Amino acid sequence: MREKINVIIVTLLMCLASVIIVPSDTIVQATSVIEDIGIDPEFIYNVTQNLSNVIFDAYNGSELRKGRAFGSKGEWFAKDIIYDVMLHHVCLLDV
């Protein structure tokens, strides 16, 4: 009998813990106004495109292309791209 009571208590506690109380005054809406937060989407696209093309740019035609796998030429090539971006673009924001 005591085990049944424990199971009922645990079940009730689990049910109470799963109840979510949401305030009725919370209104979330999407707006078409784009705030200028200093993000350059074209720059981000170009960096992402360069990192995506590592498999084509880092390897010769006869080499096994491992992408950006750990310890591969692609990883080192991507490292150089990221280093250049961080050195020349991100550091300019701090100036």
Image (cartoon, grey):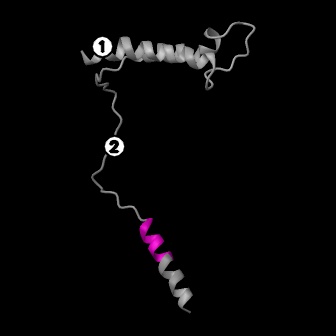
Q: Residue at x 75, y 8 (%)?
A: 62
Return the disc, 1 or 2, that comes first in the chain's sequence.
2
Residue 83 in the image, given as x and y percentages of width and height: 44, 16
Residue 71 in the image, given as x and y percentages of width and height: 61, 23
Figure label count: 2
Q: Residue at x 68, y 20 (%)?
A: 66
Residue 50 in the image, given as x and y percentages of width and height: 53, 13
- Segment tinted magenta in the rendering: 11-18
Q: Main secondary structure of the magenta part?
A: helix
Is residue 42 in sight in this rendering? no
Q: Residue at x 26, y 18 (%)?
A: 94
Q: Quadrant of the C terminus?
A: top left
Left or right: residue 92 compared with residue 72: left
Q: Secondary structure at mark 2?
A: loop
Left or right: residue 64 compared with residue 50: right
Q: Residue at x 27, y 52 (%)?
A: 25
Amino acid carrying label 1: it is Leu
Q: Which residue is mark 2?
A: 28
Magenta region includes residue 16: yes
Amino acid carrying label 2: it is Val
Q: Residue furthest right?
A: 62
Is residue 53 in sight in this rendering? yes
Q: Secondary structure at mark 1?
A: helix
Q: Which residue is mark 1?
A: 92
In terms of depth relative to the viewer, which is nearer, 86 or 41? 86
- The CA span between labels 1 and 2 is 35 Å
Q: Residue furthest front?
A: 71
Determine contact: label 1, label 2, CB under 8 Å: no
Residue 17 in the image, given as x and y percentages of width and height: 42, 67
Q: Residue furthest left?
A: 95
